[in-house]
Image: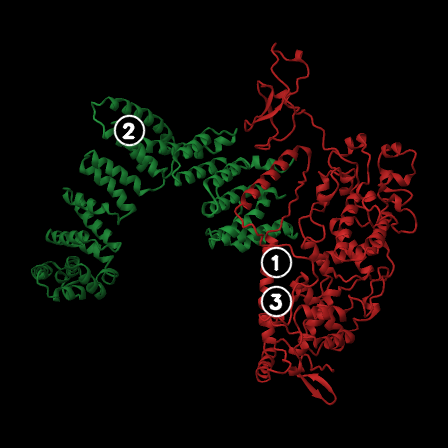
Chain colours: A green, B red
Amino acid sequence: MSDFSEELLRPMTGGDLGETRVLSGTGMCFPWLQKHIQSVVTGGKKEKDFAQTTNACLSFIQEALLKHQWQQAAEYMHSYFQILEDSDSYKRQAAPEIIWKLGSEILYYHPKSSVETFNTFADRMKNIGVMNYLKISLQHALYLLHHGMLDDANRNLSQAETWRYGEKSSSQEVLINLIQAYKGLLQYYTWSKKKTELSQLDEDDYAYNTASQNMLNHSWKTSINLSALIQIPGVWDPFVKSYVDMLEFYGDRDGAREVLTNYAYDEKFPSNPNAHIYLYNFLKREKAPREKLISVLKILYQIVPSHKLMLEFHRLLRKSEKEEHHKLGLDVLFGVLDAGCTNITAWKYLANYLRQTLMGNHLAWVQEEWNSRKNWWPSFHFSYFWAKSDWKEDKALACEKALVAGILLGKGYRYFRYISKQDHQVLRKKIKRMKKLVKKCSIVNSGL
Amino acid sequence: MDLEEAKEFRERCTQCAAVSWGLTDEGKYYCTSCHNVTERSQEVISTEAIPNTKIQAINRGLKRKRKLEKGWDWYVCEGFQHILYQQAEALKTLGVGPELKNEVLHNFWKRYLQKSKQAYCKNPVYTSRRKATVLEENASHSDWDSAPELLSDFSCPTFVESEAESQPDDHIQKPFPISRASQSETASVCSGSLDGVEYSLRKEKGVVKMTVPGTLAFCYLALLWQRETMTLSDLLRFVEEDHIPYINAFQHFPEEMKLYGRDKGIFAIESWPNYEDIHKKIIEVATFLDLPRFPDITEDCYLHPNILCMKYLMEVNLPDEMHSFTCQVVKMAGIGEVDFLTFDPIAKMAKTVKYDVQAIAVIVIVLKLLFLLDDSLEWSLSTIAEKYNEENKEDKPWFDFRKWYQVMKKSFDDKKQKWEEARAKYVWKSEKPLYHSSIDRSVVYKRREMVVNLQKQFSTLVDSTPTVEKKSPSSFQFNWTEEDTDRTCFHGHSLQGILKKKGQSLTTKNSLYWLSTQKFCKSYCKHVTTYEESNFSLSYQFILNLFSFLLRIKTSFLHEEVSLIEKRLFKTKYSKTKKKSSRSRKVRK
């Protein structure tokens, strides 16, 4: 039997089929070791010049692409196609994918290229071997989308969707789902356009009924296309968002909640901050109880402590009755500012909340937070340089920061000293109040 | 669908290459693994056999069981003969005398067929092994004709191709005008040639089996016999530059000589010839052919080191004055003697001088004698020369090694870059794809078509002017002329700055020398020395790189040749192995 049959036996997976990398224990990659191993594999036999020159050709293409020399890249590509006829079946099978990647890149940028050229190339490459059909179809569709050719993209996806290849189609189920989902996304786009049209129509209008009926048909197809994909673990943000949007429009709140909850909480799914943001926004729209909102944001806080929703989270915690929430509120503020934020609200919140906490006799909370930060916050936030530049850029921010610095580091600290010595007519009163507050609250004083 | 019925159809699916067919209701074949429906339909043999009363299948054209490609009956050695023929023609176009093809090469080949018992002998290998079919059909002829009849008209003892000029194509290009169906039916299962399978299995002791690289050994032997002005490295470079058919030479076989199956392994080549391999092959072939001593290589022959040195000095842009030094080295090392240079296959230890490598090695040695090449002396000598040239602009300029290095480095890098680019763009695959077995045929052809289509598409993206224009063949790769102002020509420069008067004669200012190999390897590993680049001076590395690129050989190979000549030159040094450091040495002029 010929070596072509191997292609059928070995399903292609992943991108790096072309090279088997040598991985050491730590996951490091040694390209040079690869070469040595390959020469062991060939039994010390000299590599054929064909293999050597096609390899060199590949390097030339990569170099040309790197330097945006599309013309040269196309020239070398012309010779590189030979690898499709390589007598080494392993290389021959890996070739279509490499050629597709390089070729589509060239055709995307080459000045003499056009959509037609790209289409012809994609159609050809789809039919070399079988394992790349779906992947190329999908990328082809994305290319068409990029060029605003929605109908063509849709046609392309429909074609790919119905493609079946015996047993091979089952191993590529995810790809088929993805293709369907993209189709769904396109349908969603049409749907939401119709939705806008509908909103401009009068409900009593004769046309309204037909239009809404039309929309309903659309949404039904779309939801089928979308729902299959988002059951599979993965990051499917745009698909989930569109699906939920439609469900909400037709009043299926439970369905929407279920999808979002599943997307955020199913452990099989990779950790994804957006999943929690979507759920939170949905619950907020639903006017869910505060407790519920807090529990959602708590997870987001663990993943992205500097997210802009954290200030909202802080407000929720502040309003809560539970003491542990109050403590967490402080934690959240410190967390936000760990990322080096120049958001005045965050500093204002911290200044106020520090005062409030200290007045509430929770010095221990503050000390707990401060202990892990006292080594680096002074130079990170409260350096002399920052004092000068903050004062220059945003005086209000500088005042808030100075207050925090004063509370945490004492009135002798350079940031506070610099700001408090500034003589400014409008802010004079504020600075005076600030000095008073620091005298009263500073943990450094109280520590003495 | 009836899978049983579809078993007849054995071709691969063009979509997925599986051989698993079912029949559709219309009687067409479809692939059970990818559901691709072909244009082919099952041939309806008898209508009664179909259970359905309606006749369902209509035969639409193409017959189901296509016969394998049919062509002439031909033998593997005829294939090689064809390649040799093409190569000889190409050599003729390159300016080699016509006697090479008609007399020398032809004779060598005939001798080969005879020695390997393929023809021109009482009991050729084919008639003894093959079944009687051949004999029966040629019953009226003698044994001689049943061998590949290719050379039957040369069987006259004069060895001279009398009708060659009048009808050169007649006998070589159509060795087998009659096709014998009965035989090819059985023989062509796995090869297009009659004896492809047998040939690839054949392992006879003492017989040199013909290969495609072997054809070049024949060509070189013929060139050497004729004392043509072409070295082995030239020959191989012409092959690489496609001036001599080699890779895909089978493409130009007559249409009726079909190749597939085992023929692929015999005739398809995926590497350019390698100097060392071909050199070995030359000796092997010459010994096997039992050739007599070749014509003498005398001082007026192109291959004599004195002439080759002159040629290479010009090529690498060194002063003509260096030639007297190379001649002296050649003389002292005794490598200019007729007996040393002339190839004698029946001598006890048959060896043929690597004329080109040797000449280049001599130049390396002269450079070492003059400039020491220790990364220091050559530069200080250059400074002196530079100063002199500045002060005496009217005089003949002194040779400035630094300036030479700069000019050569640039030209060499450019050349090498172009060479690498051209290699990367080389088209290896023939328009006539070879396949292993008949069920692969459609897939292989389809693949070829795909490549051609893709190439066509991308060629529209390329500028109409090809960047790699085909070079016209030349034994010079570098050209230096006085007119070219960017690339200084050093041929006329003088060596005065590096010589000094001593009595009546001139000696080199430099009196030191270092040996490229201190101690030769005496084990049985066959190499005499190794070349670890980093152990040597940068100037030496540069010169070896440049010169070995010129000959398209490995640097280590040139290094070895340099060491071997030094060994002849400094015999005394090597005999007194204890004394390691090299003493001063003078070359008199």
Secondary element at image label 1: helix
Q: Nearer the viewer, residue A308 or B31?
A: B31
Q: What's the distance in space between the residues labelled 2 and 3, CA to CA?
A: 73 Å
Disc 2 is placed on an element classified as: helix
Q: What residue type is labelled 3?
A: Glu
- Identify the residue at horizontal 35%, vertical 29% (top origin): A222
Same chain for the residues at labels 1 and 2, yes or no?
no
Which residue is nearer to you in this view: B242 or B144? Answer: B242
Q: In front: mark 1 or mark 3?
A: 1
Residue at numbered disc 2: A255
**Could you tell me residue B501's position as x and y percent?**
70, 87
Identity, as a three-letter code, of the amino acid under mark 2: Gly
Residue at which label 3 appears: B533
Looking at the figure, which quarter contains the N terminus of chain B?
Answer: top right
Residue B456 at x, y = what percent?
A: 57, 43
Q: Residues within 10 Å of mark 2 (few under 14, many from 20)?
A: some
Q: The residue tagged with tag 3: helix, strand or loop?
A: helix
Which residue is identified by label 1? B419
**Is B274 placed left or right of A351 in the picture?**
right
